[in-house]
C-alpha cells in the first residue's frame, strides 16, 4: 500500500485564510517526507461546494451557487503553488465524476439496509450544515463554533442508521487506539460514541444544490456525506483511465481540524462500514489557530490572518516553518504577524541562514570550494546518527512539530560546533590543516543532513543549500553521516534577509 494523505476539503463560501493553509501545509510536509522515503504517495486537497452554506453565501451575493463555487474554488486552487504545496490532485465536489461515485457508494449503503425515511426536527446551524445535539449547543441557543443562533428545522429526510454501528465503532476504537490522534481527540470522539448514537439525516429535501439521491430524486444528499466521500471518490478519477483505490485505499492519514471531528471520526467510519469499505488508518485532529481576540480564526468572525500577507512579507518558507514551529501540531495556538517575524529573525535568519552562509563561505575561502575528503568528527557525527529514524518516527505519528524540533536541535548543535572549533583560528595555523579539514567536512555534512531532513518543511531553501554543498540528493536514506560525497561548494546569498523583517506589511504587499 502507498501513503495517502488528505486535507479537509474547504468550503467555497468565502476566500482562503490561514487555517486552510495550516492543514494543507501539514499534509504537504507528510507527503513530501514519504516521497523522500521512496514510497508511492498520493496527496489530496480540494473544495467542498455543495450544501446550504454555499447556497446561502451565493444568494447573499446575488449569484448562483455554481458561480460562487467556480470563483472561490479557483482561489483555493491558486493558493496551492503559493504555499509550495505538492498535491497530486485537487478535487471539487461539483465534479461530475465525484457525484456519480457518491451516488454509487450511497446506493450501496441503501441496498445494504442502512437507510430509512423519517421526520427530522432539531436545532440546525446553517454555517456548519449540521444538526446539533443538546450537548453541542452553546449558551443562548447558539452554535459554539460560529456563535450564531441556531434555527429550528423540521423536514422529512432519508436517514442513515448510525445507531446500528455503535458497537462496531466502539470495537474499532478498542482495537486501534491510534485510529484517532492525538489521544485527547480520540477520547472526545469515543465519548461521543458511548453517549449513544442516533440515526442522522442522509438527505435534504429543501435544497437543490447537491448530489441527487438516486432512489429519490426529490432529495439531495446531506452535504457532509457527499463531502466525506471525496477522499474515496478522488482515487477513482484523479488519473484519467486509472483507478487508484487498490493502491491507496484505505487512506493513511486524514488531517482535519477539531471542529469537524464528529463527522470524520464517527459518521465517516460508519458510512464506510455500511458500504463494505475499509476505514482509514488514521484521522489526525489538529487544534485551532487563534486570532488576536483569542478565538478560533474564522471567516465569519472576521479575525483571520491572511496567509498571502505573511508570504508577501516573509516568504512562503517562513510561513511553512512558522505554522508547524510556533504552535505544536495538534493543539490550539495564537498567531500573529509579530510572532512570524520573531521566528523569521531568531531561527530562520540567525540560526539556519547564518549556518548555511558561514559554512559555504568557509569552504570557499579556506578550501576553494572543495569539501575535504576526510574522516568526520566522531563526537559530532554521533549527534546525527539515528536522526533520520527519529524524524521518520515522529512523522509516522503526525508529530510534525516534534520532528521539526528534533532537526532544529541539530541546527543549533552545528552553530555551537562552529563556535567551539573556531575554524578561522585553525586556518591561521598551517600545522592544523588536518583539523581544519575535519571541522569543515563535519560541518558541511551536518548541514547537509539537516537540510535533507528539513526538506519537507522548507523545500526551496533546502534545495538551495544542498546545491551549494554539491550534494543535491533529498532522499531520506542519505540523511546519515558520510552517506554521500560533497562538493564542489559555492557561497550562498543570505537565505532569509533581515531587511524583510523591517518592511511594513502594507509596503511588502504592494
Image: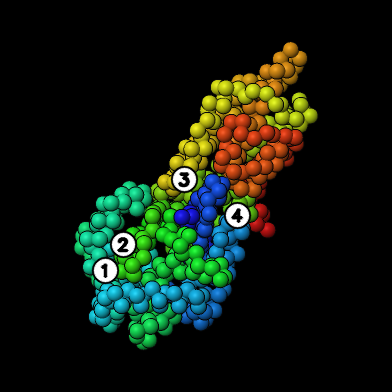
**Disc 4 marks which residue?**
84
Frontmost of labels 2 and 4 is 2
Identify the colour scheme used.
Answer: rainbow
Expressed as whole percent of the image width and height from the top left, the position of residue 246 reads 46, 62
Contact (CB < 8 A) between labels 1 and 4?
no
Which of the two discs, 2 and 4, labels the residue nearer the N terminus? 4
Q: How far is mark 3 from mark 1, CA to CA?
A: 33 Å
In the rendered image, the quadrant that contains the C terminus is: bottom right
Question: Residue at label 2?
Answer: 266
Picture quadrant where residue 206 is located: bottom left
Tell me whether circle 2 and circle 1 mark residues in contact (CB < 8 Å): yes
Q: In the rendered image of this protein, does residue 350 appear above or below residue 194?
A: above
Residue linked to disc 1? 162
Circle 3 packing at 10 Å, graded few (<14), some (14-19), many (20+), is many
Which callout, 3 or 1, points at the residue further toward the start of the chain?
Answer: 1
The residue depicted at 63 percent of the width and 54 percent of the height is: 312
The local secondary structure at tag 4 comes to: loop
In the structure shown, which secondary structural element does the residue marked by tag 1 occupy? helix
Task: Give the residue furthest to the top.
Answer: 431
Image position of 458 with respect to 297: above or below: above
Which dot, 3 or 4, sits closer to the camera? 3
Q: Which mark is residue 395?
A: 3
Amino acid at each position: 500500500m502507498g501513503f495517502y494523505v488528505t486535507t479537509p476539503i474547504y468550503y467555497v463560501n468565502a476566500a482562503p485564510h490561514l487555517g486552510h493553509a495550516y492543514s494543507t501545509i501539514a499534509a504537504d510536509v507528510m507527503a513530501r517526507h514519504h516521497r523522500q522515503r521512496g514510497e508511492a504517495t498520493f496527496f489530496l486537497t480540494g473544495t467542498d461546494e455543495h450544501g446550504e452554506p454555499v447556497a446561502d453565501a451565493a444568494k447573499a451575493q446575488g449569484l448562483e451557487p455554481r458561480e460562487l463555487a467556480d470563483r472561490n474554488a479557483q482561489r483555493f486552487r491558486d493558493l496551492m503553488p503559493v504555499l509550495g504545496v505538492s498535491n497530486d490532485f485537487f478535487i471539487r465536489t461539483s465534479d461530475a465524476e465525484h457525484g456519480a461515485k457518491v451516488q454509487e457508494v450511497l446506493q450501496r449503503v441503501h441496498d445494504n439496509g442502512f437507510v430509512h425515511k423519517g421526520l427530522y426536527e432539531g436545532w440546525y446551524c446553517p454555517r456548519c450544515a449540521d444538526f446539533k445535539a443538546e450537548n453541542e449547543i452553546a449558551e443562548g441557543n447558539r452554535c459554539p463554533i460560529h456563535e450564531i443562533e441556531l434555527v429550528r428545522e423540521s423536514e422529512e429526510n432519508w436517514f442513515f442508521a448510525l445507531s446500528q454501528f455503535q458497537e462496531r465503532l466502539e470495537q474499532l476504537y478498542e482495537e486501534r487506539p491510534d485510529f484517532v490522534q492525538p489521544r485527547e481527540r480520540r477520547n472526545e470522539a469515543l465519548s461521543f460514541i458511548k453517549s449513544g448514537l442516533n440515526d442522522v439525516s442522509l438527505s435534504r429535501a429543501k435544497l437543490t444544490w447537491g448530489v441527487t439521491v438516486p432512489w429519490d430524486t426529490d432529495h439531495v444528499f446531506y452535504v457532509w456525506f457527499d463531502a466525506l466521500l471525496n477522499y474515496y471518490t478522488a482515487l477513482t478519477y484523479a488519473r484519467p483511465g486509472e483507478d487508484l483505490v487498490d493502491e491507496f485505499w484505505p487512506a493513511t492519514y486524514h488531517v482535519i481540524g477539531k471542529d469537524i471531528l464528529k463527522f470524520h471520526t464517527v459518521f465517516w467510519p460508519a458510512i464506510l462500514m455500511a458500504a463494505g469499505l475499509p476505514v482509514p488508518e488514521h484521522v489526525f485532529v489538529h487544534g485551532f489557530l487563534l486570532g488576536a481576540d483569542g478565538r478560533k480564526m474564522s471567516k465569519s468572525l472576521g479575525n483571520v490572518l491572511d496567509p498571502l500577507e505573511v508570504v508577501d512579507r516573509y516568504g512562503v518558507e517562513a510561513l511553512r516553518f512558522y505554522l508547524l514551529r510556533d504552535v505544536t501540531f495538534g493543539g490550539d495556538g495564537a498567531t500573529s504577524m509579530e510572532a512570524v517575524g520573531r521566528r523569521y529573525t531568531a531561527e530562520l535568519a540567525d540560526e539556519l541562514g547564518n549556518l548555511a552562509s558561514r559554512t559555504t563561505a568557509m569552504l570557499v575561502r579556506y578550501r576553494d570550494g572543495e569539501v575535504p575528503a576526510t574522516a568526520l568528527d566522531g563526537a559530532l557525527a554521533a549527534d546525527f546518527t539515528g536522526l533520520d529514524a527519529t524524524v521518520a518516527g515522529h512523522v509516522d505519528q503526525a508529530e510534525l512539530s516534534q520532528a521539526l524540533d528534533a532537526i532544529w536541535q541539530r541546527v543549533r548543535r552545528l552553530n555551537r560546533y562552529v563556535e567551539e572549533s573556531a575554524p578561522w583560528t585553525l586556518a591561521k595555523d598551517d600545522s592544523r590543516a588536518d583539523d581544519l579539514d575535519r571541522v569543515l567536512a563535519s560541518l558541511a555534512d551536518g548541514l547537509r543532513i539537516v537540510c535533507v531532513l528539513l526538506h519537507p518543511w522548507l523545500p526551496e531553501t533546502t534545495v538551495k543549500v544542498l546545491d551549494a554543498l554539491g550534494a543535491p540528493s533529498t532522499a531520506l536514506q542519505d540523511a546519515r553521516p558520510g552517506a554521500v560525497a560533497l562538493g564542489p561548494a559555492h557561497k550562498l546569498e543570505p537565505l532569509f534577509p533581515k531587511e524583510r523583517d523591517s518592511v511594513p506589511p502594507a509596503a511588502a504587499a504592494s
